[in-house]
Amino acid sequence: MNPRQFSRSHMLAELRSGEPFDVLVIGGGITGVGVALDAAARGLRTALVERDDFASGTSSKSSKMVHGGLRYLQNGDVRLVYEALRERRRLMQNAPHLVDVLPFMIPIMTKDSVVSKKIARALGSAMWMYDFTGGWRIGKFHKRVNAKQAAEHFPTTNLDKLSSGYLYYDAGADDARLVVTLARTAAQRGAVLANRCGVVGVTTDAGGQTNGVVVEADGDQFPVGARVVVNAAGVWADDVRALDEGANPDSIRPAKGVHLTIPWEKVRNDIAVIIPVRSDKRSLFLVPWGPQADGSYSHCYVGTTDTDHDGGLDDHQTTAVDIDYVLTALNDALETTITLADVTGVWSGLRPLVKANAGDEPMGKTADLSRQHQVAVSDSGVVRVSGGKLTTYRKMAEDTVEIAMQQLGRRRRASRKQSTKRLKLIGARGHRSTQPGTQVGHLARRYGSLAAEVKALIAFEPALGEPIAPGHQYVLAEVVYAARHEMATTLSDVLERRTRLHIFDREAALTAAPRVAALMATELHWDMAETEHQLDNYRQLCAAEEAAARDQLAAHITD
């Protein structure tokens, strides 16, 4: 296999070859692709299989932040914050085209606020701790701003109650774009990765030790041998454990996180703002999104909730109760009023939090559970990585592969040359920062130096330089590029993850869907029936999102 060819057909052929792998990873989220990259960087023959699409689970539905987590420091989890801030710095160095500095402000109000002047003094101490724990690595320290300065950053808040604010710095990234870039970087290192290739069984040798898996792709089942199998399936980790251990251990406590997207002009914050939730003393992030050339933004998003999810892992729609919770907190922080009619996009994800004791009934708030990751080995030798957070994916992967190396009887620690600490992701080398809000800037922020490949498509066919949807920066060339080079196989892959049009503006994505499907049909050789099938699936997805909110709203009003 050509290690640079990120082609599903080539990858599946490699999986079918019968040659066993050193390491096979189950799960194509941020943790799984991180493990695949780490293993491949050490020279291990590596494979990864994903039941759906890369980042289709939690890893495309996060708050899109690469951060230490100020609240974790306030909860006393200093080790996690230190580790996350160190990994934040590494990711900014290794993927400067994907990770940007993101300033945050905590407004301090004179009255009727969760964040009072008394609490503000305690926050000041926490800010210094955050800086000294590793926040300074971003090159800036926090600072106190007066009411006028705070109002300039958040002009739609209750200005008559605004006393001052704290400004500090973290980073942000498009989570799904990061996952795909990691996957392609792993492939460059020789890893074999395939989406829409689900595990249906775990195989063992005569001694009861795992020696591979049985996968299903395109309706066909076949075995894939591996000396070590890694379970990196996130919230679905227990389902994989059931295949290995014979029973579901009930060790994961899924926590639902919901975000809403609204037009930026409704709020006009030029930096991320932390807003309090009066009802439960939590806080939400209000983040500007889609930078424009004039310094404004196209949208902003607000979230996230943190509640137990007791339904199916594949069914966690955003409900009217979720929307009401977020909008109530947002409107408490604004002089203006945001309504459901203003919401252009929603997304709901499940955090794979680890229970203190497997099988126990949920106790306490999910927000209080640790975000530290755990690595363990089953009796049959399957290595399992659970928990964690997006920012620390590299360290999670490193810890996991060290255990896999031990299983293989090899030296655990990676050499300096093999380590991912300084490994540049594809697109990082040769990347130069450009003006946001322009087509050049938009492509550079998504592809880095590989933007030249997207521009080449436009040069060959200028019509591909047109926007996918009016008012949005994604261009048609990105659809073609996703199908050719990023293993996008469905319409939802492109509209939800390779671009983020669906969560920016669902109505715009629905309108654009036929044109996007036509381009994909040409690239992937869909006939008319398959093209209609893809459109029907996407329309059903959108209808399900709308119905969840509508039906829950009716029940909410009745109650």
Image: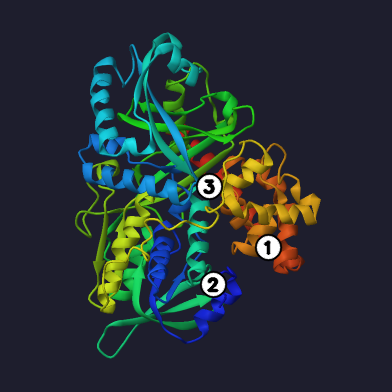
Q: Amino acid at mark 2?
A: Pro
The disc label shown at residue 97, or none: 3
Q: Amino acid at mark 3?
A: His
Earlier residue among tags 2 and 1: 2
Q: Secondary structure at mark 2?
A: loop
Give the residue drawn at x 55%, y 46%. Answer: 545
Provide residue 213's location: percent of width, then percent of height. 40, 79
Q: Secondary structure at mark 3?
A: loop
Q: In the image, which is nearer the foreground, mark 1 or mark 3?
A: 3
Q: Quadrant of the C terminus?
A: top left
Q: Label 2: which residue?
A: 3
Task: Say if 258 sits above or below 265 in the image.
Answer: below
In-front residue for pair 158/394: 394
Q: Label 1: which residue?
A: 533
In-front residue for pair 285/323: 285
Q: In the image, which is nearer the foreground, mark 2 or mark 1?
A: 2
The reply, left or right, for residue 445 in relation to residue 107 is right
